[in-house]
């Protein structure tokens, strides 16, 4: 099999350009991840799960150059919120710009402390579980090679959101971060992420949400036009737990966001949502895999994309209902608004169901702005651009509604409005 | 269906019409077509090689160009790998361990008319409900206001036994004959169109078919002609350990119209049998083709022993402006179904429709769906797919809707619903949606549910037993597709839906 060989060669080439960390508490997990990666190889264009996104720039040994962002172009997200800031510059932790981590109960992956038993049972573990039935070699690469990231364990209700800020200063930076978050029974945490991170960014977030715990995740990816990113969220949910993740993506030549969510306790709820707006050289890929392995769980996938000037939006979503996962309520919607004739929307919304007493549905649509709605608004005296902007925001509303905190939702809405204004909508 | 005896023992209860009872009653015999015709058969040697390809070509009295075409396909096939992307699980197929050609000995000299055909063969079709007489209707179908004629091409193992109404069709200018005859009699037409919709190298199973196809039907409807009757082909596998590889080519010239029906059955056997067919349809300007299939190959027993492996490539090329194709399929048989009837909407304003009911029970596995490739402007497509899984069966809808950059102002609407009966089966949906322009609209909807308890309760409270009630609810679920079938098939399909689900309740 020449293809499998080429994939393994690509993995070796990539690994040879990296300094792999040795030893430490995560040593065994990293060695296993390395073995996984070597067996799989790195993805190629012919892989079923990469048919709509070319992985070559994510796979190649050196990061392609990405020019820096003009800060006048877009304000930083979440600035008005009381939060614990953890700042990484090109993937390197920056204590000067960060808040006191110890007080907030945030550990760093790079500080090899003794008492991290809980992280040992998480690091690379959820990633490994997420490798079947679909391989995610870039996540295995991350587990094997990442040396930095945060380790957060929450036992009660976190007072402030933890805010991970990724700054980009070098045009050729190639960053890798690996975060582990564990919410113990009944705990609650809001995790914020924003910033372009690096010229090329590979990030893994592993989240264990124990029984009755609640996890909120809001992130914005954007700013730098030439950046590339591949991110993975691996989450495992206990009984009556809640997981909510929302991502806003604007700009970036290539973004692949994978979310692999496993509902293992009865009555758990998982919502994953995304809004992506792209103008020009923009390729955005949401790949979501939700597994229902317990009874009476609810999952929602809501993904909306607004595309213009040749931007490409990809959605690959799957709901897998395992045998015995009765009374599952699974919902999935992927929609795109194509603002001109050069943009593309490529979708593969899948259902795989092995239990009979379930309610699962998915919908996918693609089209232009509704001319009648536009006409209606204009006939009421709304100027064309404002009317278009209004309709675009209305289109994205269902995804933004997945953010529970009204203040954060408003922040996202304002960012979208200003993006639309800058991009002539 | 356990408690059903003979017709007169059953009283028609209030709220249950006679038809429902009869439908359910028809199921008592399980797979109705599992018998075998004992007839002397001539086989080609077992296995597959160039000599077998040459032999098939020679048996069909083919010209040299056809043999070359087959050999080229065979050589290419040797380089190809069997596709494994479908959600189907079956043991490795040994392509050398079967016969590629089987023909009743009585067909050694091709009968000149139906009167000369071996009575055993005629009796076979009679028993299948497809009498090879120039009759007014397909057997068992009543209720048409006017008697309707249906011409039949009957294919038995590797050969066409006979074609009815040939003369009458000829008067209208319609050519309806076996493909082997067409290759001899109308080589120019065959040369011009064969392999232009499904190319020789299309996929593993289609390429295999190109090399070894033995018979099938050929239809040519000339410009402006509305085919005076419905055409149909009935495929029967009889010989053991033999693969059937039929090839159908339908050409609807400008402004022509034809409705084509296809049916198929096979005897019950403990071993699997391979069926790899190719259907090509060419539709020119303003022409319309309706292609309906009731696929009822032997599905295997409850344990998954035996049954047909059905790997089929069907594709229509809407070459002309305003051309139209409608695929309707009821898939109830086969142990394995791998089938994606597709439409290439090349002509501006062309239309493609796909209506499907796929039922998988016991150990059956079906991976079926369609491709709608929009190339021309203002093209429209509609997909309605209903998948039903019961027993331990797996049923997958797999489809592609592709809007090319130049397919401006095109539309697609897709609806695929799955129904699960029992907690050991699976229902899956794998749609691919590719939109490359913004004036086109694509809408895809899918749902999965179980038979609604309220509906069942309602039926039961009206005195129906549980299996009757399920059959009724399922027929309701399939209604949209059943309505798209020609009447000859609608009735059969409706009862098939019930048969296939037999034993799946409780």
Image (tube, rainbow, N blue to C red):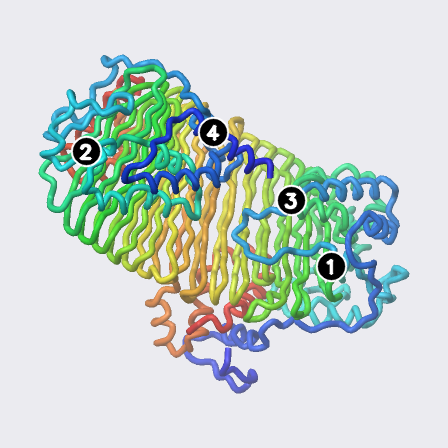
Rendered position, B19 above or below A52: below
Q: How many C-alpha atoms fall within 10 Å of the one at disc 3: few (<14), some, or many (≥20)?
A: few
Q: Residue at x 48, y 67 (%)?
A: B391
- Going by the picture, which residue comes out furthest to the front? A23
Q: Chain of mark 4?
A: A
> CA gap, disc 1 to disc 3?
18 Å
Q: Chain of mark 3?
A: B
Q: Are marks 1 and 3 in contact (CB under 8 Å)?
A: no
| Residue located beneath label 3 in the image | B81
Q: Secondary structure at mark 4?
A: loop
Q: Secondary structure at mark 2?
A: helix
Is residue A371 in view from this perspective?
no
| Residue located beneath label 2 in the image | A409
Q: Chain of mark 2?
A: A
Of A307 and B228, the residue lying toward us = A307
| Residue located beneath label 4 in the image | A54
> CA gap, disc 3 to disc 4?
24 Å
Q: Are marks 4 and 2 in contact (CB under 8 Å)?
A: no
**Count of numbered labels shown in the rendering:** 4
Q: Residue at x 49, y 59 (%)?
A: B394
Q: Nearer the viewer, mark 4 or mark 2?
A: 4
Rendered position, B214 above or below B118: above
Q: Residue at x 33, y 61 (%)?
A: A326
- Going by the picture, which residue comes out furthest to the right? B109
């Amino acid at each position: 099999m020449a293809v499998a060989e080429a994939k393994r060669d690509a993995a070796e080439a990539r690994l040879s350009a990296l300094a792999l960390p040795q030893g430490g508490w995560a040593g065994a997990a990293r060695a296993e991840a390395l073995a996984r990666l070597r067996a799989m190889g790195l993805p190629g264009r012919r892989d079923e799960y990469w048919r709509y996104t070319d992985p070559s720039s994510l796979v190649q040994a050196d990061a392609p150059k990405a020019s820096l962002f003009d800060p006048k172009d877009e304000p930083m997200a979440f600035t008005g919120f009381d939060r614990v800031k953890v700042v990484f510059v090109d993937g390197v932790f920056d204590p000067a710009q960060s808040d006191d981590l110890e007080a907030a109960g945030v550990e760093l992956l790079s500080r090899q402390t003794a008492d991290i038993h809980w992280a040992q049972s998480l690091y690379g573990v959820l990633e490994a579980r997420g490798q079947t039935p679909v391989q995610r070699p870039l996540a295995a690469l991350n587990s094997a090679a990442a040396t930095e990231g945060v380790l957060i364990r929450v036992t009660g209700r976190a007072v402030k959101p933890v805010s991970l800020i990724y700054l980009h200063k070098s045009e050729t930076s190639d960053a890798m971060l690996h975060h582990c978050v564990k919410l113990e029974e009944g705990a609650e945490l809001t995790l914020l992420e924003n910033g372009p991170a690096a010229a090329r960014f590979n990030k893994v977030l592993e989240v264990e949400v124990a029984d009755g715990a609640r996890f909120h995740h809001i992130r914005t990816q954007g700013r730098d036009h030439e950046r590339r990113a591949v991110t993975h969220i691996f989450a495992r949910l206990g009984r009556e737990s809640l997981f909510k993740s929302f991502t806003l993506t604007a700009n970036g030549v290539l973004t692949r966001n994978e979310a692999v969510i496993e509902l293992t306790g009865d009555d758990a709820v998982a919502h994953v949502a995304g809004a992506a707006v792209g103008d020009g050289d923009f390729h955005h890929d949401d790949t979501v895999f939700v597994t229902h392995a317990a009874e009476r769980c609810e999952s929602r996938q809501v993904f909306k994309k607004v595309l213009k000037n040749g931007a490409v939006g990809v959605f690959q979503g799957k709901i897998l209902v395992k045998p015995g996962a009765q009374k599952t309520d699974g919902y999935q919607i992927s929609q795109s608004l194509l603002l001109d004739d050069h943009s593309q929307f490529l979708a593969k919304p899948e259902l795989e169901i092995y239990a009979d007493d379930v309610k699962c549905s998915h919908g996918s649509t693609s089209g232009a702005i509704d001319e009648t709605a536009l006409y209606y608004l204009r006939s009421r005296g709304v100027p064309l651009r404002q009317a278009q902007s209004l309709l675009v925001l209305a289109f994205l509303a269902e995804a933004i509604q997945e953010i529970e905190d009204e203040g954060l939702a408003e922040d996202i809405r304002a960012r979208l409005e200003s993006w639309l204004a800058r991009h002539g909508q | 269906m356990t408690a059903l005896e003979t017709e007169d023992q059953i009283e028609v209860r209030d709220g249950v019409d006679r038809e429902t009872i009869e439908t359910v009653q028809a199921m008592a015999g399980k797979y109705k077509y599992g018998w075998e015709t004992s007839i002397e058969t001539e086989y080609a040697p077992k296995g597959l090689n160039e000599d077998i390809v040459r032999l098939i070509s020679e048996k069909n009295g083919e010209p040299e160009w056809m043999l070359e075409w087959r050999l080229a396909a065979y050589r290419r096939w040797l380089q190809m790998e069997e596709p494994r992307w479908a959600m189907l699980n079956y043991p490795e197929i040994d392509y050398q361990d079967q016969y590629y050609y089987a023909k009743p000995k009585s067909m050694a000299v091709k009968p000149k008319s139906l009167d000369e055909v071996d009575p055993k063969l005629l009796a076979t079709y009679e028993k299948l409900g497809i009498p090879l007489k120039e009759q007014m209707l397909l057997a068992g179908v009543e209720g048409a206001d006017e008697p309707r004629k249906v011409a039949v091409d009957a294919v038995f193992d590797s050969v066409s036994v006979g074609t009815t109404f040939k003369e009458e069709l000829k008067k209208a200018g319609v050519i309806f004959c076996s493909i082997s005859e067409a290759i001899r009699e109308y080589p120019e037409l065959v040369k011009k169109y064969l392999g232009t919709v499904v190319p020789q190298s299309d996929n593993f199973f289609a390429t295999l078919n190109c090399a070894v196809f033995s018979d099938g039907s050929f239809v040519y409807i000339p410009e402006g002609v509305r085919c005076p009757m419905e055409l149909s082909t009935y495929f029967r596998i009889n010989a053991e350990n033999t693969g059937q590889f039929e090839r159908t080519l339908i050409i609807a010239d400008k402004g022509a119209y034809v409705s084509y029906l296809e049916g198929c059955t096979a005897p019950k056997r403990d071993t699997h049998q391979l069926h790899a067919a190719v259907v090509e349809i060419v539709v020119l300007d303003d022409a319309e083709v309706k292609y309906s299939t009731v696929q009822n190959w032997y599905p295997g027993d409850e344990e998954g022993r035996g049954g047909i492996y059905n790997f089929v490539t069907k594709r229509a090329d809407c070459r002309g402006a305003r051309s139209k194709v409608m695929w309707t399929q009821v898939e109830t048989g086969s142990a394995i179904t791998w089938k994606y009837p597709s439409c290439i909407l090349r002509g501006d304003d062309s239309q493609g429709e796909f209506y499907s009911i796929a039922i998988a029970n016991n150990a059956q596995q079906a991976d079926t769906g369609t491709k709608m490739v929009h190339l021309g402007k203002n093209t429209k497509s509609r997909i309605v797919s209903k998948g039903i899984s019961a027993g331990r069966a797996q049923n997958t809808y797999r489809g592609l809707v592709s809007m090319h950059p130049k397919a401006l102002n095109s539309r697609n609407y897709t609806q695929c619903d799955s129904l699960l009966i029992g907690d050991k089966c699976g229902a899956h949906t794998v749609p691919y949606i590719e939109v490359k322009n913004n004036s086109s609209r694509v809408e895809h909807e899918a749902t999965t549910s179980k038979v609604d308890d309220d509906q069942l309760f309602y039926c039961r409270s009206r005195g129906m037993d549980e299996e009757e009630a399920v059959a009724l609810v399922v027929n309701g679920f399939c209604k949209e597709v059943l309505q798209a079938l020609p009447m000859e098939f609608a009735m059969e399909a409706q009862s098939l839906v019930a048969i296939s689900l037999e034993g799946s309740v409780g």
